[in-house]
Amino acid sequence: MWSDTDPAGIVWFGVFFRYFENAEEDLFRRLGCDRTPLLRQLGIFMPRTSLQTRFRSPARLGEELTVGVGIGEITDRRIGFVFDIHERGTDRFICDASYRVACVDAATFAPRPCPDEIVALLSRALVTT
Amino acid sequence: MWSDTDPAGIVWFGVFFRYFENAEEDLFRRLGCDRTPLLRQLGIFMPRTSLQTRFRSPARLGEELTVGVGIGEITDRRIGFVFDIHERGTDRFICDASYRVACVDAATFAPRPCPDEIVALLSRALVTT
Amino acid sequence: MWSDTDPAGIVWFGVFFRYFENAEEDLFRRLGCDRTPLLRQLGIFMPRTSLQTRFRSPARLGEELTVGVGIGEITDRRIGFVFDIHERGTDRFICDASYRVACVDAATFAPRPCPDEIVALLSRALVTT
Amino acid sequence: MWSDTDPAGIVWFGVFFRYFENAEEDLFRRLGCDRTPLLRQLGIFMPRTSLQTRFRSPARLGEELTVGVGIGEITDRRIGFVFDIHERGTDRFICDASYRVACVDAATFAPRPCPDEIVALLSRALVTT
């Protein structure tokens, strides 16, 4: 994680978005479907449309982190992912985040409804609050 | 920008946070004070505490971008930066964002009021809406 | 550059490769031809095949850098770029590097001779030592 | 790995250096000693002084990679790490690399001999060729 940390000795805030998207890819995998071949087969990309994050405590160099991921909302128009990061062991709260993604045509970037396969797959990770 | 773009051929969303923080550093510089020596002299770090972004249009490989930065709010407790990114030339709107930063002691990470120097300096970039 | 620096307060070594490739893109631009549309039109990618770097002096947070770029060798089989980075003002030597790129078909990744357009264009930046 | 891949759909070459340094940190951990607290306690940093890499085959989005790491040479003046990356499963060769690190004083960046603790620890991972 040396390369992820900044001169303050903590994970640089922009790095968390890599952790989040990696967790998103893991979620697809755990649900039984790799995201990359799935999107390729469906001919779509899934760009983020909005995002919010709260940083509560710094993640220092050398600390092990746990990244939680789930689905906060899902329709054929948009999908909301939710994330939280804690320090492993102590369970200290580092940050949480949510972002929305849309579906667009891979060739034209024109908006498209989220394919049923995606909605059905991700609905299984819906978080009830 | 090749290294900033993803397999969809557009700037990966996490890269924008580097653009934002670079713009923040530029802002300090334009106001007459490099951020790095200033924070070192004051013995503080300025971690982000929350952040939100809206992505409206993709930034494709090879497009030139303009990054706007200003101060949205400022007190001795928190500072809000606001950003917007447009395509140079066409002025197409790519994304906007805001984030809040706090001041912490560089040694202990304990919260501290924002030093008067910082508040006075950044107030000059306050955006009126 | 805050996001480019590591907990030692210096530019993390992996970040220099972004500086190098940005300089390569600038070189194409200065020679009158944006790399992205050129490669797209030719139907090729130009992957790196080997690379070497010497790091002589750290680039500290807040230091301004100058990146030099040129062509060290060029045939229809491979192109060698050379780079050097100095601190602006003092001219202190930070690092130098060279890498070779090949041409591959954008669809199949099969090797292809470097197109004449590329060889002619880049030959104008050939460094004589 | 979406964020690690470029518009050619392959891992961007500069990303491998993050993989390499992560493997270096893992090596310290497997040998029983976290690098971060060890260096802090010794009051040193270990900057890279030179590096070479050969890229043989692209790592495509979605491919699982195995990163090998070992010590190629070690004296009290310099330490050489060696790396190789293969595709998991097929064992296809992606790239290999080596880099040398030196020891410097954490406060002054003045060169220092590599501490005996480091030499003894890493010698156990010496690769015989």
Image: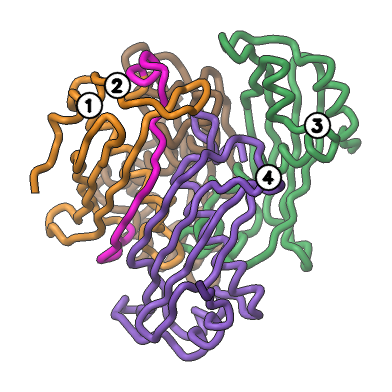
Chain colours: A brown, B green, C purple, D orange
Nearer to us: label 1 or label 4:
4
- Tag 4 secondary structure: loop
Q: Residue at x 20, y 29 (%)?
A: D122
Q: Are marks 2 and 4 in contact (CB under 8 Å)?
A: no
| Type of the residue with mark 1 | Val
Residue marked by disc 1? D119
Tell me where the magenta segment starts and ends, as one range: D37-61
Dot 2: chain letter: D
Q: Is residue D42 magenta?
A: yes
Q: Chain of mark 4?
A: C
D99 with respect to B59 (left or right): left
Task: Name above or below for residue C43 compared with residue D10.
Answer: below
Q: How packed is label 1: few (under 14 Cα within 10 Å), some, or many (20 or more)?
A: some
- Residue displayed at 59% across by 49% down: A49
What numbered label is drawn on residue B33? 3
Residue on which the image places disc 2 = D115
